[in-house]
Amino acid sequence: MSASKSKSEPVTEPIVEPTAEPVVAVSPVDERAAIDKAKLAAYAERQKAKAEPKRAPEYWARQLGQLMQVKLLSGQRATVPRPKHAAADALHGWTLHAEQAPEHLIMTRADYEAALVAAARTVPCVDGRSHYVPFGPAASEYAPAVRAGVKAI
């Protein structure tokens, strides 16, 4: 107490209002753990992208049921592609690539599925007509559309 105040006066202390949100101190260990979790998640994504196998279109067609067995008039069985695979093959030049290129054309499953979608839809062009446009990672340099100068999506 100060000398100017008498003993009978009560001592008042300033009232501190509580804050709306409690203050939480984050330790450096917690920050490091959060950073490590983010790095691990990013690393897992990169590894998943690397681990996705790249295979030939025929492999993906077999895996995804795009090939079917038919019985010929002669009684023999033959394997033929379903219409979606046949359209994607014609647009992207997979058979032409297999016949002319020394190396196999390989792609991921996502690329194969995107190629099937690209073969099933048309893209409107400036001239007012619609065209089929190949999907870039699945297109061969031997594809008729690529040779004609159509830019892949």
Image (cartoon, helix red, strand yellow):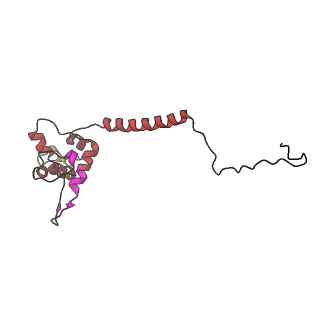
- Highlighted range, magenta: 115-143
Q: Is 113 on the left or on the right of 86, as rendered?
A: right
- Rendered residue at 47%/36% (across/down): 35
Q: Residue at x 10, y 53 (%)?
A: 148
Q: Is residue 141 magenta?
A: yes
Question: In which image quadrant can residue 94 be found?
Answer: top left
User: Who is closer to the viewer here, 26 or 75?
Assistant: 26
- Residue extending furthest front? 4
Q: Is residue 124 magenta?
A: yes
Give residue 62's position: percent from left, percent from top.
24, 42
Q: Find the residue positioned furthest to the left.
A: 100
- For this orientation, the residue located farthest to the top is 29
- Of residues 2 and 56, the one drawn nearer to the viewer in this rendering: 2
| Residue 29 in the figure: left or right of residue 52 | right
x and y percent of residue 99 in the render?
9, 40
Question: Residue 8: x and y, percent?
Answer: 91, 48
Q: Is residue 143 above or below residue 105?
A: below
- Image coordinates of residue 53 in percent, x first then y, are 28, 36
Picture quarter containing residue 102? top left
| Residue depicted at 54% across the width and 34% down the height | 28
Q: Vertical placement of 99 versus 16: above or below?
A: above
